[in-house]
């Protein structure tokens, strides 16, 4: 059986650019798989928002993320890229983080160059560590991973505060330190991606998140500037939230859910996605053996 990291690397080579679907839990992973995505992503913001109703301000732990990684990788064989934030501590902690993530069934993870008191990449007030400190984080991540197939991605949030030239210098240093891909955050122009894809020998990821600093560039436009991966980290989560709120309001206002049935997944589709009939048949076979020892 191929390592999940190998599957992710192959997907990056075969689907250009590779569209990566953000999922908040195992069931969302099944939905993304059914839709046809070839790779998945677990967002740190998604863990904080969906699991604890908290903002993306570094208040969740490695164990919180590992729990969701385990659930997702048990539900699907699609490769999963994981948001490791700043690595949860010192370089020794970072090394442990990447050891555990690489043993959890994930395909790869990214670590960022924000200060430990991090925030959402599309908010103001981000603080960036030195290039030297980030290189240390990357070396710790590379030393910690259980398998060389586990993809180590560097994320840089420096563009907003340091400009393109200094951020490009950082990216080249990250590549030299062993980063195998680059997550370029809060990009505002297509030409900025092109500057990085031309200068680097590693794949570049575009984070196309809604309502942030980055326009919703199309797959075709990003392909033209050499982007290798496109990430949609919380698109489905935002849609789920909006529909759920509408359903709750409708039930209270109208006293019935009749008018919003069209927004819902029906029971047959749910059962099909869960392989409900297969599990029932297995249960019946166990019960028969119990009745006829």
Image (cartoon, helix red, strand yellow):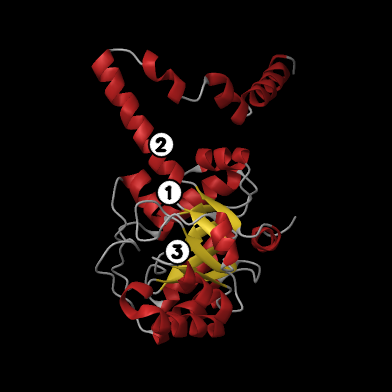
Element on which disc 1 rests:
loop
Q: Can residue 154 be seen in this view?
A: no
Q: Which residue is drawn at 36% across and 31% down?
A: 244
* Label 1–label 2 contact, CB within 8 A: no
Q: Which mark is residue 82?
A: none
Residue assigned mark 2: 240
Q: Which part of the image, by quadrant, shows the N terminus? A: bottom right
Residue 24, placed above or below residue 97: above
Q: Which part of the image, by quadrant, shows the C terminus? A: top right
Say which label, 2 or 3, has the lower sequence index.
3
Q: Residue at x 59, y 65 (%)?
A: 224
Residue assigned mark 3: 84
Q: Residue 278: image x %, image y %?
A: 68, 25
Q: Which residue is drawn at 71% across and 16% down?
A: 288
Q: Residue 198: image x %, image y %?
A: 57, 78
Residue assigned mark 1: 234
Residue 53, placed above or below residue 63: above
Label 3: few (<14), some (14–19) or many (≥20) C-alpha neighbours in 10 Å: many
Q: Residue 84: image x %, image y %?
A: 45, 63
Nearest the camera: 211 or 173? 211
Tell me the distance, in whole angstroms, between the alpha carbons under discs 2 and 3. Answer: 24 Å
């Amino acid at each position: 059986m191929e390592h999940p990291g190998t599957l992710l690397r192959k997907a990056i080579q075969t689907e250009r650019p590779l569209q990566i679907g953000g999922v908040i839990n195992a069931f969302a992973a099944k939905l993304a798989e059914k839709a046809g995505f070839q790779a998945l992503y677990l967002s740190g913001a998604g863990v904080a928002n969906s699991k604890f109703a908290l903002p993306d301000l570094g208040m969740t732990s490695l164990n919180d993320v590992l729990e969701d990684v385990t659930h997702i990788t048990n539900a699907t064989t699609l490769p999963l890229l994981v948001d490791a934030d700043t690595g949860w501590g010192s370089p020794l902690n970072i090394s442990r983080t990447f050891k555990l993530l690489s043993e959890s069934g994930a395909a790869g993870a990214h670590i960022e160059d924000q200060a430990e008191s991090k925030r959402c990449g599309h908010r103001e007030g981000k603080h960036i560590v030195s290039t030297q400190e980030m290189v240390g984080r990357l070396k710790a991540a590379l030393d910690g991973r259980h398998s060389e197939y586990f993809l180590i991605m560097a994320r840089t949030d420096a563009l907003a505060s340091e400009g393109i030239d200094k951020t490009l210098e950082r990216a080249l240093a990250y590549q030299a330190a062993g980063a195998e891909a680059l997550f370029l955050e809060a990009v505002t122009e297509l030409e900025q991606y092109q500057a990085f894809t031309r200068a680097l020998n590693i794949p570049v990821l575009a984070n196309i998140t809604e309502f942030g600093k980055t326009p919703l560039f199309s797959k075709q436009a990003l392909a033209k500037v050499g982007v290798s991966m496109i990430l949609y980290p919380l698109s489905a989560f935002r849609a789920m939230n909006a529909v759920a709120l509408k359903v709750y309001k409708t039930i209270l206002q109208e006293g019935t859910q009749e008018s919003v049935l069209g927004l819902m997944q029906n029971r047959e589709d749910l059962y099909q996605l869960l392989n409900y009939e297969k599990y029932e048949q297995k249960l019946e076979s166990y019960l028969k053996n119990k009745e006829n020892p």
